[in-house]
Amino acid sequence: MASQPETDTPTSPVSREQDHEPAAGLDRDLAALLEVERFEPPAEFREQALLNDPSIYEQAARDPQAWWAEQAEQLHWFRKWDQVLDDSNPPFYKWFIGGTLNASYNCLDRHVEAGLAGRVAYHWYGEEGEQRDITYGELLAEVKCFASALKDLGVRKGDVVGIYLPMIPEVIVAMLACARIGAPHNVVFGGFSAEAVRERMEFSEAKVLITVDGAARKGKTASVKDRVDEVMGDLATLQHIVVVRSKGTACQMKQGRDVYYDEIIAAADPECPAEELDAEHPLYILYTSGSTAKPKGILHTTGGYMAGVSATHRYVFDLKPNSDVYWCAADVGWVTGHSYIVYGPLANGATSVMWEGAPDYPHKGIWWELIERNRVSILYCAPTAIRACIKWGAEYPNKHDLSSLRLLGTVGEPINPKAWLWYHKVIGGERCPIVDTWWQTETGCIMITPLPGITATKPGSATRPFPGVEAEVRAESSGEPIEQGQGLLVLTRPWPSMLRTLYKEDERFIAAYYERFGRETYLVGDAARKDKDGYFWVIGRIDDVVNVSGHRLSTAEVESAIVAHPDVAEAAVIGQHDEDTGQAIVAFVTLQGDLQGDDAAVEGIRESVAERIGKFARPKRIIWTDDLPKTRSGKIMRRLLRDIAEGRELGDVTTLRDPEVTSKLQERIKELQAQEA
Ligand code: WTA
């Protein structure tokens, strides 16, 4: 079976699969699937696809700048660029130099001017059955009003605006209103805690924060504004808080600082022309996790980002805006939401579904119900969600007519063959190609992916770089390119939607991505394998970043939240393979003095993490220990902890300060596993 990864790395897709039994009824199919090895695009799909001629790859590779310029031509420019790429000062690349445009104009005005004001941009659904269809015309009108209102609050071009909102239509309005006046937005995922919001507002010196009274989650309403107030009080740079009245939750309003969204909109000028912005004008900052506890402020600019997201959205999803109904079931607070709920789909004039809630509320079939109701034709989600659906059972999707689907996508983590097969059969009815898209907050748009009308897919592989993108696998030791085998993933050519820097941290930007292989080779931070057909299999992170249910987290960030608890002396956090969430957070914790690791201590630590980062970052397991495995110089050996947690052979531990520590921990893990079983 050539398609099977040759590696025995525990995180590789197929070796994962061997860790557990395939779901009942799927095991024979799974064996058959791995025999098939490749899935060619169905003939009918290929015939009608926007791209179906494989020579596109060679064409783009011959002249990548011309290819990207062709993509940028699809956008509306107030002034066209003089030069496609300025690569005179790597890694500080610039794209479409001299060009001016506006992202909100590209997402809204130009469609309205083309007569599409009545086209639905979003079919929005609330948790309790609320429904709103928002057309391009309505969205434009509201964006103009809110952009005027932001100006009235004193927001000027270049000022950073924070956004902390749930999946309600106002989050889209807020982002586009910022883009309209050239105020870079800094969106914080609604699952982050208020403290995490404060930190991000502080780092980015945000002038205004847009938030909400309360947010719905599985039938409950959590107050948001009041939580924000508790931590935000003394932040000098923050001049205003705008509050969207969404759930009617009572909240304190501070005079002179806080205003209601609906009130400032009602008072604002309904006209607000889109600013003509330089192609390199910052569009947004999005904080993401790196190797240290301080999150990285990824900075994206306007022209290149818009060219990248619109082109990939069009071709990877084979988007036919007149007939498709598209649904990206991510949260706008992550990059997937920025690029493939907001900017990509709107730039392409798509009609999308937007869902406020969780996949299992009010019932476990809600996704499939929404697909049937809206005749969704393209679905894009994370493998974690698919694994949850497998657990709940095929009876939920089977109750609904999913025949409108013609293309499926995944993002965020490697997909294991079992989940791929289930997605293919149960959801896709064996007729929909699956695009497994690899990319990052940093890359802005999809980088490695099948083109659904061209590329034969192999379950678990993101296949090939998108046209114009060049990727390699490099040997860890020599740095030489590896034609077939495993190593470090790098991108060897600049691309338009690449991050421009880390906000106000140019040195850190270079150190994180452009030191290891020089200033022209982007170090991704993932390990990958390249197979005999040149297909890429992304295995997982090489740094201390973990991926829990597609949420990117830094172990250092979680450690610092744990040691902030007064009872904790020391902590080390690792990501452990998890059947449901991809990876799970495991914390090894030493308490102060004679304190006992009991249930109350577990709760206290989990609460500390929830408060400082967010509930989604709480450790799944806490393992008490008197000591941690350390080198003689006192460095914690996290690699050993990972081996211990995964039950791997440890090899030589004699260089440790106290080799006994590891065997004690191995015993603890065995006890815990026995208890959990
Ligand atoms: C991982 C999410 C395997 C990878 C868009 C990357 C993937 C990190 C895939 C970025 C995929 C994303 N297959 N792994 N298709 N897509 N990843 O910044 O480790 O939240 O570096 O962006 O997710 O996470 P981020």
Image (spheres, grey):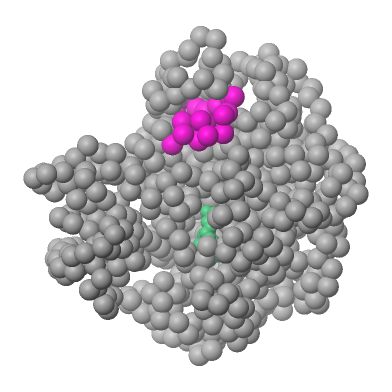
Tell me: residue 649, above or below residue 405. below
* Residue 2 horizontal/vertical position (percent): 54, 89
The answer to which quarter of the image holds residue 531 is bottom right
Q: Quadrant of the C terminus?
A: bottom left
In the visual, does 508 lie left or right of 316? left
Question: Residue most toward the front?
Answer: 633
Tell me: residue 544, above or below residue 182. below
* Residue 294 horizontal/vertical position (percent): 46, 44
* Residue 129 horizontal/vertical position (percent): 49, 38
Q: Is residue 125 visible?
A: no
Q: Residue at x 60, y 39 (%)?
A: 504
The answer to which quarter of the image holds residue 520 is bottom right
Q: Residue at x 76, y 66 (%)?
A: 468
**In-front residue for pair 600/503:** 503
Question: Residue most toward the left?
Answer: 594
Q: Is residue 203 magenta?
A: yes
* Residue 223 horizontal/vertical position (percent): 40, 27
In the visual, does 505 lie left or right of 656? right
Q: Is residue 64 visible?
A: yes
Q: Is residue 644 magenta?
A: no
**In-front residue for pair 391/275:** 275
Magenta part of the protein: which range? 196-214
Q: Residue at x 59, y 21 (%)?
A: 261
